Image (cartoon, grey):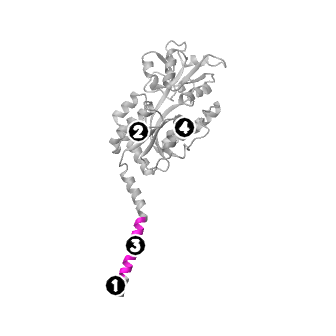
Amino acid sequence: MHPQRSGITLRNKTAALMTGAALALATPAFQGASAQETFPNKPINITVTFPPGGGTDILARLIGNYMSETLGHGAIVENKPGASGNVGAKYLADRAPDGYSLLMVNSSFAINPAVFSKLPFDPKRDFVPIVNMAWIPSVLVVPANSPYKTLTELLTAAKPAKNDVSYGSCGNGTPQHLAGASLNIFAKTHITHIPYGGCGPALKDVLGGQIPLAIITASSAMTQIQAGKLRALAVTSPNRSALLPDVPSVAEQGYPGYELNQWHGLLAPANTPPAVQQKLFEGINKALQLPAVKEKLISLGYTPAYDGPAAFKKIVDGDIDKFVKLAKDIGLKVD
């Protein structure tokens, strides 16, 4: 074999091997970039931290159906209830951060760090907020034949350390529980808390007159308010609800700064690529603005929200800090 020809062949083989190695090393980066550019290329999984049929589940299924129109693929919803949502949150925290796993939560997610001594995840570090979909206030309701015609009358009766005013909530550590606890702090009242196993049982007992007051989601009480069976004294949002425009907020009735407005949104596992986060937000945001989706949200008592990753993170982290302080002030622990 000719020496020069042999040398050329050897050099060519060496160059080819080096090029192949370089391409092999670069392949994951190229694949990652390509995956983000084509995302999504299959259905997205949405884990709901509550049982089927509740408001959070309904919202997940609503937006999941319309994601196919704006992202090209719909969503598969699975329910993983338990421990006030902590079971589903832990499950999501352990999923791959590829954008195909989302967690549908409400404000209870921000309350749990305040009322559970230990969590199997870090609520601030193990998740990235994607979008806040909607707000819904709670409403203070009394039976139609209640002696309390206004919030002022009720709070006046609840001023003494010993009184007969109590309120039913949707359960220990729920937004409705803390709405009542906050009211006691703002108004310097002594309203006794009676926790129920959901908004439904509390609604049933206030309708039956077993309790003088209930604080439940506006959507849960809406039908009975419209039927004249319940009287709404106030909503817990900072402003009036479009669903109940004639019902003043607690804040506008002499307690500025009072607010407990329940949000509902989607989170992803930490380390989900920013480009994927943004694509998810843009697609879900477009779906939220579809007329059919907006009309459905409003009919259910929700105010549509369009808060993106940065704004939603500020809301979630701010609520975590606020509820930790509130729970400490009232000595609340669930476990």
Q: Residue furthest bottom?
A: 2
Residue located at (54% from left, 30% from top):
175
- Residue 198, position as x, y percentages in the image: 51, 26
Nearer the observer, 158 or 2? 2
Q: CA separation, marks 1 and 4?
A: 72 Å
Amino acid found under the numbered disc labelled 3: Leu
In this rendering, is residue 319 above or below 217?
below
Residue topped by disc 2: 77
Residue topped by disc 3: 17
- Residue 182, position as x, y percentages in the image: 59, 28
Among numbered discs 4 and 3, the one appearing first in the sequence:
3
Amino acid found under the numbered disc labelled 4: Ala
Residue topped by disc 4: 110
Among numbered discs 1 and 4, the one appearing first in the sequence:
1
Extent of the magenta region: 8-24
Q: CA separation, marks 3 and 1?
A: 18 Å
Q: Is residue 172 in sight in this rendering?
A: yes
Q: CA separation, marks 4 and 2?
A: 22 Å
Q: Is residue 256 in sight in this rendering?
A: no
Among numbered discs 2 and 1, the one appearing first in the sequence:
1
Q: Is residue 53 left or right of residue 178?
A: left
Number of other residues with Cα within 10 Å of mark 3, as a class: few under 14, some 14 to 19, many 20 or more: few
Residue topped by disc 1: 5
In this rendering, is residue 326 above or below 245?
below
Among numbered discs 4 and 2, the one appearing first in the sequence:
2
Residue located at (41% from left, 43% from top):
45
Number of other residues with Cα within 10 Å of mark 2, as a class: few under 14, some 14 to 19, many 20 or more: many
| Occupied quadrant, residue 159 | top right
Circle 4/circle 3 CB separation < 8 Å = no
Among numbered discs 3 and 2, the one appearing first in the sequence:
3
Q: CA separation, marks 2 and 1?
A: 64 Å
